[in-house]
Image (cartoon, helix red, strand yellow):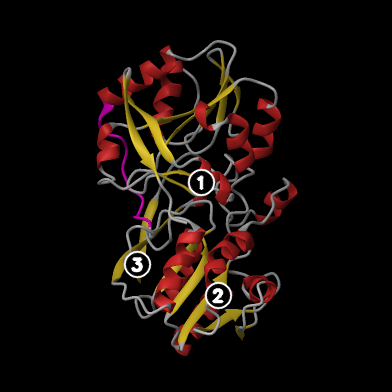
Amino acid sequence: MFRLGLIINPVAGIGGAVGLKGSDGVVAEALARGAVPKAQERARQALLPLCELTQAFELLTVGGEMGADLTASLQLPHTILYQPASPSSAADTRAAAELMREAGVDLLLFAGGDGTARDVCAAVGESCHVLGIPAGCKIHSGVYGVTPAASGRVAARMIGGELLSLVDAEVVDIDEEAFRAGKVRARHYGQMQVPGDLRYVQATKQGGRESEELVLADLAAGVVEEMVPDTLYLMGSGSTVAACMGELGLENTLLGVDLVENGRLIGQDLSAAEILTRIRGRHCRLIITLIGGQGHLFGRGNQQLSPEVIRAVGRDHIQVLATKTKLAALEGRPLLVDTDDPALNRSLSGYLRITTGYKDQVIYPVANPE
């Protein structure tokens, strides 16, 4: 019988929606700001495709919020292999992963972000087949599904006996303290083996800064020229949007969300709750870019743009910026959205206009696997 392991980092992503850009060492502050843990729900979305296959696999998991609470609520038969401390820590993730490797799991599913991937990699390396359920704030590593449901779909296919090639995927993480200061310092931590289905498993985030400076400057000039008076503009994260802020002559939160009106900065590094309060009842547009190499628009490092925020703005008022070089690097793969709302993900699918230069646009597909 197929042996499936499950580990959930219960605080993964807790700092995202409240603007903390990570979870390491800031759990208490995130909760004080009103953060709501979402790792359980993300893991639940991944496990739903498995609920009809309970006779085909044995599930090994961790006690409490690290797995057993969720599997019990879904009535999935399971064995608790490890009992974590309370509250749990990264040491519990590593210990549980080691036990699952020793138990010979055929696939280890884990819900978290890059920090969780680091812990699992430290415990199992390339000796165990793994797949991440994306639940963290920053997910640069190539070991995660493009959405939680996609991770579950891959697991279901493996349990069903389909032959999926295994490939080496990179585990990378960034310095969260530097990240909160607007600097990206990425480091390679190793490789793990994941199912190699490119429809469902994301690529490693593309490093480096935009090299097409002239194209980027022209793009930014066009965006600023077309800004409408008395309209709120939510300016998303990333260097492409930062070029627009530079064109406006405004200070920019490279890895946060700022608010601009009539050429003035009126809100900086806002949380999801703050955004909703500020835009309620106002005309608002959202300017974002995609993550190079992965193609994600939402759900990777910009959890401040919550489902409620995206709905309040509306699909027709979202402007996506990307140079043609950045789009070409996707090699035809669609853009991706991974909010905490599957219905919203579906509503965002289809073709979007992408601003690629000065008064230059292309259409590009958004098509996420369910």
* Residue 30 in picture, x, y percent from top left: 68, 50
Task: Tell me the CA gap for discs 3 and 1.
Answer: 34 Å
In reply to whether residue 299 is colored magenta, the answer given is no
Q: Earlier in the sequence, mark 3 or mark 1?
A: 3
As drawn, 197 above or below 73: above
Front-most of residues 252 and 340: 340
* Residue that badge 2 annotates: 52
Residue under label 1, please give it. Answer: 346
Magenta stretch: give its range.
Answer: 202-213
Q: Residues within 10 Å of mark 3 (few under 14, many from 20)?
A: some
Which residue matches tag 3? Answer: 190
Front residue of this view, candidates 225 and 120: 225
Q: What is the spatial separation of the Cα atoms under label 2 and label 1, in whole angstroms?
A: 23 Å
Q: Nearer the viewer, residue 263 or 365?
A: 365
> In this orientation, does residue 17 appear?
yes
User: Which residue is at a point 64% across and 32% down the rendered structure image?
Assistant: 275
The numbered mark at residue 298 is: none
Callout 1, which amino acid?
Answer: Arg
Q: Position of residue 48 (x, y in %)?
A: 57, 67
- Of callouts 3 and 2, which one flags the residue occurring earlier in the amino acid sequence? 2
The amino acid marked with disc number 3 is: Gly
